[in-house]
Image (cartoon, rainbow, N blue to C red):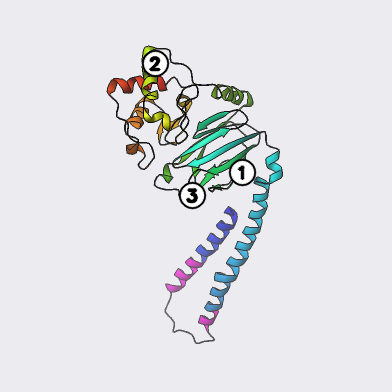
Amino acid sequence: MLVGSAVVFAVVLALVVVVVVRRRGAATPADGPGGRNRGAHIFVGLAGVLVPLVVLAALFALTLGTVSTTSSAAGASSSVMTIQVTGRQWFWDVEYPDHHVRTANEIHIPVDETVTIVALSGDVIHSFWVPELNRKIDMIPGQRNVIRLRADRAGVFRGQCAEFCGLQHAHMAFTVVAEPRDTLDAWLARESQPAPQPQTVAEQRGQQVLLGSSCVYCHTIDGTNASGQIGPDLTHLASRRSIGAGVVPNTPGYLAGWILDPQHLKPGNKMPATALSGPELQDLLAYLRTLR
């Protein structure tokens, strides 16, 4: 499609140059029905109707072949791992059903191995897209779509929602981390464990701040009574690179700002502001930083 578009663009640009050069010459009277105007009409009909029809039909046929090789049912069954990704307003809910792992906004995959992404939606239409790894695919409420990802090198690849899903569509990013199989296995083993118990007095106070608040109705922390399903799973929050689906880095300062006033960083998201005193906030941050 890139090559076809480049050729069409070059031809159109050349025709524009020809028109500009000819108009800079001496003006001539308009020709009659059988003169140059008739030839121009024929040219417009060919270049404006016939050529686009042929070009678009050819590109469509080539695209069909590409789609079949990137998301065929046979290829999906040969993948080494299935990951379920649910688009929500406005974060990505990521689950590894075979490993009992649930995280958010971050997908870990093995290098040089094919994984199957089951794309779902929890509310409106989203679109899952990792430009460096594959094409985009829509996430439609009530429908199960499938796409495959394969990274030929280790690295961090940015993903983005490609379908307008509401006020914070532009801040609907995620990362795909491709890593060696042994590194991935170690990550999955850690992520499948419940949250570690707080060790210091400040961490223990911070846990009580969280468990005694309305946070437990929206978030899950495995190993505690927090079991909400509305927001991201926080069991291993501290190990993630960002918060708010890529809005800000996952640092204590940004995390504190998000807790106190998430609407300032991401207007329209479903998390309300939290009224905490300074000491309560510091204790809560101390506890959240243990969730690795």
4 in magenta: no
Name the secondary structure under disc 2. helix
Q: Are the residues at dot 2 and dot 3 in contact (C-beta closer than 8 Å)?
A: no
Snapshot quadrant of residue 90: top left
Q: Label 2, on which residue?
A: 204
Q: Label 1, on which residue?
A: 147
Q: Earlier in the sequence, mark 2 or mark 1?
A: 1
Residue at x-position 67% and y-position 41%: 76
Report the mark closest to the observer, 2 or 3. Answer: 2
Q: Label 3, on which residue?
A: 163
Callout 2 crowding tier (Cα within 10 Å): few <14, some 14–19, many ≥20: some
Where does residue 143 sit, x and y in percent of width and height? 58, 48
Report the mark closest to the observer, 2 or 1. Answer: 2
Side of 227 where 252 appears, left or right: left
Q: Which mark is residue 52?
A: none
Residue farthest along the top direction in this orientation:
200
Callout 1 crowding tier (Cα within 10 Å): few <14, some 14–19, many ≥20: many
Please determine whether, in this image, residue 95 is positioned above or below residue 194: below
Where does residue 236 sit, x and y in percent of width and height? 48, 25
Residue at x-position 69% and y-position 45%: 73
Between the residue at mark 2 and the residue at mark 3, the CA separation in whole angstroms equals: 42 Å
* Magenta highlight range: 15-39
Q: Report how many numbered discs are placed on residues in the image.
A: 3
